[in-house]
Amino acid sequence: MDSAVEEKTCSPKVIDINRIMEMIPHRYPMLMVDKLIDVYPDQSAVGVKNVTINEPFFQGHFPSRPVMPGVLIIEAMAQTAAVLVVETLGQKAEGKLVYFMTVDDARFRKPVGPGDCLMIHVTKERSRGNVWRFKGEAKVDGVLMAEATFAAMIMAD
């Protein structure tokens, strides 16, 4: 059996919010992921974002029809990927800053609003040095809401 397939069949890991805050430097109001499930280091993960009316962006986007901004959905994808990278690289990567390099083929299919549970699927396409490239899909109840391909760089101290 192929070792990649073998690894994928192992039990996935779950990462809670307390561990996420040890792994990446984001904090309220910019922390866009509540937990990660189905974490397969160096491969893929699913981030969970419980969208509530208490989110600060809903005050202005839009008061009469609250919609989560698409850029924040992309940010949730990036944070999910960042936690996956730290889980892959280990403690030496914890708390490091990660900067977007590219966002390609972003598509926003349906609006995300209060009460939605956004499932953020990220899959590593490749990594070279400190640059990682991912495919991200954001879904609610299995329905594709947004997707993008993006690359990010982990900054050294």
Image: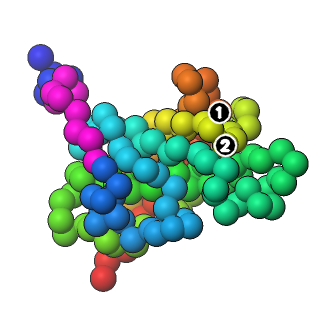
The structure residue drawn at horizontal position 54% and vertical position 22%, both measured from the top left corner, is: 142
Determine the image quadrant of residue 126: top left
Pick whichever, 55 or 126, lies toward us: 55
How far from the left and from the top, in percent, is residue 119?
49, 36
Q: Residue furthest bottom?
A: 157
The structure residue drawn at horizontal position 83% and vertical position 45%, both measured from the top left corner, is: 65
Which quadrant, please, contains the C terminus? Answer: bottom left
Query: Is residue 115 visible to the viewer in this orientation of the structure?
Result: yes
Q: How would you rate the neighbour count of disc 1 (Cα within 10 Å): few for under 14, some for 14-19, many for 20 or more?
A: many
Q: Is residue 14 left or right of residue 117?
A: left
How far from the left and from the top, in percent, is residue 81?
40, 50
Task: Describe the element under mark 1 as helix, strand or loop.
Answer: strand
Is residue 11 one of those drawn in magenta? Answer: yes
Residue type pointed to by label 1: Met
In the image, the segment drawn in magenta is 7-15
Which label is found at residue 114? 2
Q: Which residue is mark 1?
A: 145
Residue type pointed to by label 2: Pro
Q: Earlier in the sequence, mark 2 or mark 1?
A: 2
